Amino acid sequence: MPDENCLHCQTDLFCSQQEQHHLYTAFKEYSEKDLLTYPSDKMITLLENVHDRLFYFLNENGHKSKLISNFKQIFFNNYISDFCDVHRCGNVIVEECLPFFLPLIYKYVKGKKKPVHFSSGHYEKLKQFKTT
């Protein structure tokens, strides 16, 4: 696990000041002081990388079983971590975030298996957009 006393872990995971891409998180602040912790650019890049590779993986392997374990194996075979070597922050983040992607994985796979159906209200809205 990342060590809260490790300076390398802290700089790898968290940003010292707010930036433009932290705007959504900043709206969650309840006071004038910055009390929330903001992710570093390195952390954001890692999660984007996991997300992008996961969708590519699902396009190729979504019909197979053991999606999570197969994805982890492929991801870590090609992953070069530049996070803290002592505490393996990057690996821990990937391991911990995959359960949060699980509903997304099943929704994606389920959606690929059946055609998209819209309600009648959706069709009416789509007609309005096409005519304007």
Image (cartoon, grey):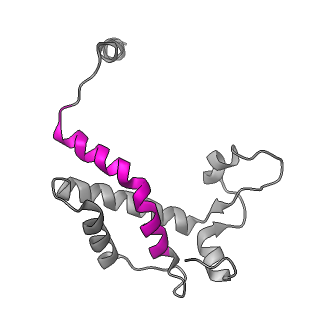
Is 94 a magenta residue? yes
Residue 54 against residue 73 in the figure, above or below: above
Locate the C terminus and report the quarter of the image it occupies: top left
Residue 42 against residue 5 in the figure, above or below: above
Which of the two residues, 6 or 18, is positioned nearer the viewer here? Answer: 6
Locate the N terminus and report the quarter of the image it occupies: bottom right
Q: Residue 92: x percent and y percent?
A: 48, 73
Which of the two residues, 68 or 108, is positioned nearer the viewer here? Answer: 68
Which of the two residues, 110 or 31, is positioned nearer the viewer here? Answer: 110
The residue under the point 60% across, 66% down is 40
Q: Is residue 6 left or right of residue 108?
A: right
Residue extending furthest toward the right: 32
Is 65 a magenta residue? no
Q: Is residue 120 left or right of residue 42?
A: left
Q: Which residues are magenta?
A: 90-115
Q: Is residue 73 left or right of residue 19?
A: left
Label the magenta part by its dominant secondary structure. helix
Q: Residue 16: x percent and y percent?
A: 71, 67
The residue under the point 36% across, 48% down is 104
Q: Is residue 25 left or right of residue 51?
A: right
The quadrant in which residue 67 appears is bottom left
The quadrant in which residue 118 appears is top left
Q: Residue 35: x percent and y percent?
A: 77, 56
The residue under the point 64% across, 49% down is 25
Q: Residue 22: x percent and y percent?
A: 63, 52
